Amino acid sequence: MMQSPTAPGDFAHSHPVPPPSGGTAITAGVLACLGGTHRLLSILVLIAGIALLSDLDAAGETNGARALFAISIPVFLLAGSLLLAGGIQMFRKHASARRLIVIGCAVDIAYSIIEAVVVLAVAGASDDYGVIGSPLFAIFVAVFPTATIILTSATSTTRWLEYRA
């Protein structure tokens, strides 16, 4: 009796498993680096905003925006640093990259939700919250961190991080 080349136990004809391409992991790393850079550059905008609001604050026209900006700076520093470090670690294939990116994105999403609620509460009486305080803006801001978490948590990312050539 003749065995077929694909019979169980016949490994001479099996094809080697190709190495993972890393497309998902690299995309997650790029998104993490972009998100981290965005948050760190946002700190500069917030500092400039605080300086500009000092004149309006004396007149009582800021509705707590200066305080919100001041609170945002350490949160953005934390989220941005975690995302940037995680993105760089992702490119270096360190397992800690996933944890850093997921925590950074979670901080970013949670703060975006809290910020939207606070802005809506402060501006609720006047119904003048503009684009930044709108719920649609909060949803838009959470899209990229959510996509980054999904890509970072994908099994293909795990395979790529664990693969050693």
Image (cartoon, rainbow, N blue to C red):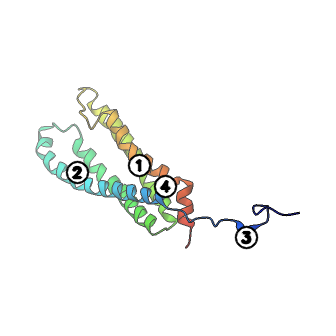
Judged from the image, the secondary structure of the residue bearing numbered disc 4 is helix
Judged from the image, the secondary structure of the residue bearing numbered disc 1 is helix
Q: Amino acid at mark 2?
A: Leu
Label 1 or label 3, whichever comes before in sequence order: 3
Q: Where's residue 136, x and y in %?
A: 34, 34
Q: Is residue 128 left or right of residue 3?
A: left
Which numbered disc covers residue 46? 2
In the picture of the structure, the residue carrying the numbered disc 4 is 152
In the picture of the structure, the residue carrying the numbered disc 3 is 12
Foreground tag (1 vs 3) = 3
Measure the alpha-carbon separation of dots 1 and 3.
46 Å
Q: Is residue 146 left or right of residue 117?
A: right
Foreground tag (3 vs 2) = 3
Q: Disc 1, disc 4: CB below 8 Å?
A: no
Q: Disc 3, disc 2: CB below 8 Å?
A: no
Residue drawn where x is 76% and y is 63% of the image: 5
**Looking at this view, is 7 or 93 the one in front?**
7
In the picture of the structure, the residue carrying the numbered disc 1 is 145
